[in-house]
Image (cartoon, rainbow, N blue to C red):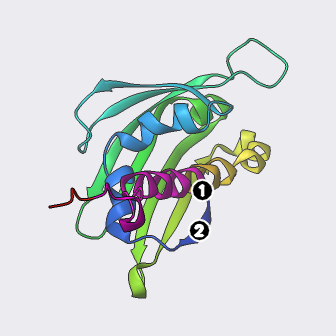
Amino acid sequence: MGTTWHELETDLPAADLWEVYGGLLVGQLVTQLLPQLFSKVEVLDGDGDVSTALLVTFAPAPGTDASSGSCKDKFIKIDNENYVKESEVIEGGFLDLGFRKYLVRFEIIRKEDKTSIIRSTVEYEVDEEHISNASLVSTRVFASIAEATVNYIKDQKSSRQAPEQSSDEQAPTPEK
């Protein structure tokens, strides 16, 4: 049994982050933002609420054409008030490596001044005979997702706030 986590402090409001993390959007974005890690995320069942099942296909290892595998995840908790989402691997992935449990929890923690923290936690249990595989557990992928998500939201905000025509560039007014 073990737990590991990663935290990323951001200058974004928690509500903005939860718009991405709280439903299916994060799964749609990872294939675009992190194609070196994820080749496809498919919804097998559900609409983003608890019990939604996803098939996550990982990108091929560098220098190969072969897929790095896949896993089925199921959302087991979504708390829209406290910004907590839990997903558990139900098939493939770490379960094929002797793990009995592999759970990922995303928490968006509100801070002062419209800042927040993205905490990504992995909880796992591994069979005694595969205990050496516990060293494979890492939050590196979730750290990459957090950073890419923050950059995505900032890019979206800046493109929505594109500068309008300044007063110096206004068309001249007709003379009377």
Q: Which residue is mark 1?
A: 147
Query: Per the image, is 152 magenta?
Result: yes
Q: Position of residue 139 (x, y in %)?
A: 65, 54
Please give the range of residues in magenta.
Answer: 147-172
- Label 2 sits on a secondary structure element that is strand
* Distance CA(mark 1)–CA(mark 2): 8 Å
Where is residue 91? Give x, y as percent.
48, 28
| Depth order, front residue of 22/160 | 160
- Helix or strand or loop: what does disc 1 sit on? helix
Residue at 37% over, 51% down: 20
- Kindly identify which residue carries mark 2: 8
Left-right relation of 103 to 166: right
167 lies left or right of 90: left
At 60% from the left edge and 40% from the top edge, which residue is drawn?
Answer: 99
Q: Answer few, some or many: residues within 10 Å of disc 1's Cα (few below 14, many 20 plus, some between 14 and 19).
A: some
Q: Amino acid at mark 2?
A: Leu
Closer-to-camera residue (133/144): 144
Asked where in the image residue 79 lies, by quadrant, the reply is bottom left
Asked if residue 93 is positioned above or below residue 23 in the image, the reply reads: above
Task: Determine contact: label 1, label 2, CB under 8 Å.
Answer: yes
Which of the 4 image quarters holds residue 146? Answer: bottom right
* Residue depicted at x 65% and y 25%: 59
